[in-house]
Amino acid sequence: MAFVVDASIVACWALVDERHAVADKALELIRSEEAAAPGLLWFEIRNILVVNERRKRLTEAATHAFLQRLAVLPILEDRSPDEAEVMRLARTRKLSVYDAAYLELARRKKIPLATLDDALAGAARKEGVGLVR
């Protein structure tokens, strides 16, 4: 596994008007290396997509097509978080439990994190976790 990918990165892949250099870099990396994400990514991405359908930024057809493309990417779903560590990270770094799950996975696997979330990136730096840049 090369890195942990979070929902902010994957959302950029779905929303063409939300391009970002870090998301582009992560997409480039994922073409040659595996990524990992906590199981909650499945829910977060689908929620982002349906919210953007409601905002008329995506059609159902576009959502369906994106999910098909996403399904073939080598993103390994991790379903074994260290609960105590997730809670510690959420508390000490003032993160949501969701964001702490991404950070916990990156720490546990000793791999960098790809995120556009400033608070999560700052917490990763404080925890000694590298970032995809």
Image (cartoon, helix red, strand yellow):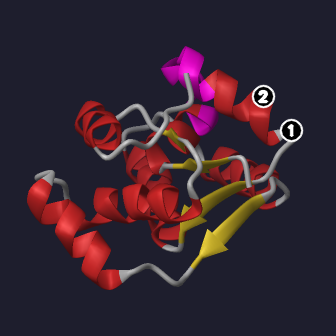
Residue 13 rendering spot, x and y as whole percentages: 63, 35
Q: Are marks 1 and 2 in contact (CB under 8 Å)?
A: yes
* Location of mark 2 (residue): 28
What range of the chain is rendered magenta? Answer: 13-23
Q: Is residue 14 at all visible to an observer of this figure?
A: yes
Give the vertical position of 93 relative to 126 (above or below). Answer: below
Residue found at x 83% / y 45%: 33
Q: Is residue 18 magenta?
A: yes
Callout 2 amino acid: Glu
- Residue projecting furthest to the top: 21
Give the vertical position of 119 relative to 47 (above or below). Answer: above
Horizontal relation, residue 38 to residue 85: left or right: right
Give the vertical position of 113 relative to 86 (above or below). Answer: above
Residue 127 rendering spot, x and y as whole percentages: 31, 47
Give the camera-side residue of 72 and 84: 84
Residue 31 is marked as: 1
Residue found at x 64% / y 59%: 36
Residue found at x 50% / y 55%: 106
Q: For the stretch drawn in magenta, what is the main secondary structure?
A: helix
Give the vertical position of 2 relative to 19 (above or below). Answer: below
Callout 1 amino acid: Arg
Please rate how many residues cluster around mark 1, counting C-alpha atoms within 10 Å: few if below 14, some from 14 to 19, many from 20: few
The image quadrant where one finds the C terminus is top right
Horizontal relation, residue 120 to residue 42: left or right: left
Per the model, the C-alpha gap separating discs 1 and 2 is: 6 Å
Residue found at x 26% / y 39%: 126
Q: Secondary structure at mark 1?
A: loop
Please rate how many residues cluster around mark 2, counting C-alpha atoms within 10 Å: few if below 14, some from 14 to 19, many from 20: few
